[in-house]
Amino acid sequence: MVELLFVVGIAVAVFVGFNIGGSSTGVAFGPAVGSGTLSKLLAAALMTGFALLGGWTVGREVVNTMGGQIVPQARFTLAASVAVLFFVGFALLISNLSGVPASTSMTAVGAIAGLGAASGSLNMDKMGEIISWWLIAPVIAFWFCAVIGRYFYPYLVSNIDLEPDEDGNVTTKQRIGQVLVVVIGCYMAFSAGASNVANAVAPLVGSGELGLEPGILLAGGAIGLGAFTIARRTLDTVGNDLTDLPLLAALIVEAVSASIITFLSALGIPASLAVSATMAIVGLGWGRATRTTKISEAAGKAVSGEAPEQVAPEKSVSAALSADQPGGEVARIGEEEPNELKASDLFNPGTTARVISLWILTPSLSAVASFLLFSAFPIYG
């Protein structure tokens, strides 16, 4: 019976890693494949290698956190570990059905927290630290990209041309840009491995049924399996909403979000790459859109209670960031035409509310369901 349960646990861990590979490959290498710089096969190979590297180096800190610091390792019996992994798999199912990238890291932490609450062994200090970073990281992503969007993005677009000419000619600058696309994709894959390897194997490693290094290899292999199979579909559509952006904007978002997640992984904090990337997109678009107004003017309107101008709901971040063209003259802040670019162009409020609601809902449901399960069936140690 124990051997069968272990096999089930391995199967669920592979399922989790498989789905992570399928979704993360599009995020990391969608721009490179969409621009014709990489083939899908080479993108999958790079995803596999760098995700494994991220898990083997930085990611082991996250495995240690999720496998023994939120709740004691003794609580991770084999049965409890398999149950936690099922919650992570369920989160992936919700994500796929809803079309919203739910955070497997946040859901996994929620399930482990439910186990800790039911067993009376939850480390509140560690949970407080994790939740604090969940709140801080998206704010950092937003404001860092907002500053780039407001003060630097138009100049970067004017001086950096990543798109080949219509006749297929590629300049030296564009060659450098293609290399940059691949390098940042590899960096994104590294950060995805660093943060997500723990989601697949941390409970099993915590139970002692699976060693740390074999667990990382198992998760890395599962991510690679997803990269070579189901990721081909996401690469066909050039990943997700991230790659609807202009190529330069997508690279900025990737670099910022990957840096935040790599930093948090080094601290042993499980965090969501999707959350940071989405807030980076919104921040970049918002910062770019606010160039129509000087800070002094915006403050004056806020004090007077003047309402912002309204625009058509079909406007998007992509439209806001596509307003700039390589080689074009950059208007100074406050001199751009408000009817061409408005601060409310940056996102669809309804969609954003749905995404944020799901980010809050999935780990909360995971924690409650886990608590109820382990309260009714105390299969923990």
Image (cartoon, grey):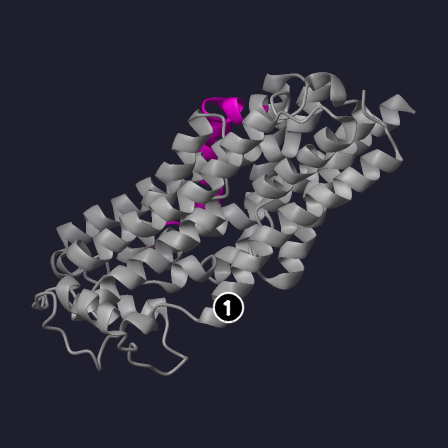
Judge the density around disc 1: few (<14), some (14-19), many (≥20) Cα neighbours within 10 Å.
few
Residue 59 is one of the magenta-drawn residues:
yes
**Residue 136 in which image quadrant:** top left
> So how many labels did they put on this image?
1
Q: Which residue is at 18% across, 60% downward?
A: 157
Give above or below for 258 relative to 71: below
Q: Is residue 205 left or right of residue 283?
A: right
The percent position of residue 181, horizontal first and vertical second, equals 30, 48
The residue nearer to you, when weighing 14 against 125, is 125
Span highlighted in magenta in the image: 35-63
Residue 204, image x, y percentages: 71, 25
Q: Is residue 38 above or below residue 85?
A: below
Q: How far from the left and from the top, in percent, is residue 71?
A: 67, 24
Which quarter of the image is occupied by the C terminus? top right
Of all residues, the one furthest to the right in this rendering is: 1
- Magenta span: helix, strand or loop, mainly? helix
Amino acid bearing label 1: Thr
Establish if 192 lies above or below 343.
Answer: above
* Residue 116 in the image, given as x and y percentages of width and height: 71, 29
Identify the residue under disc 1: 351
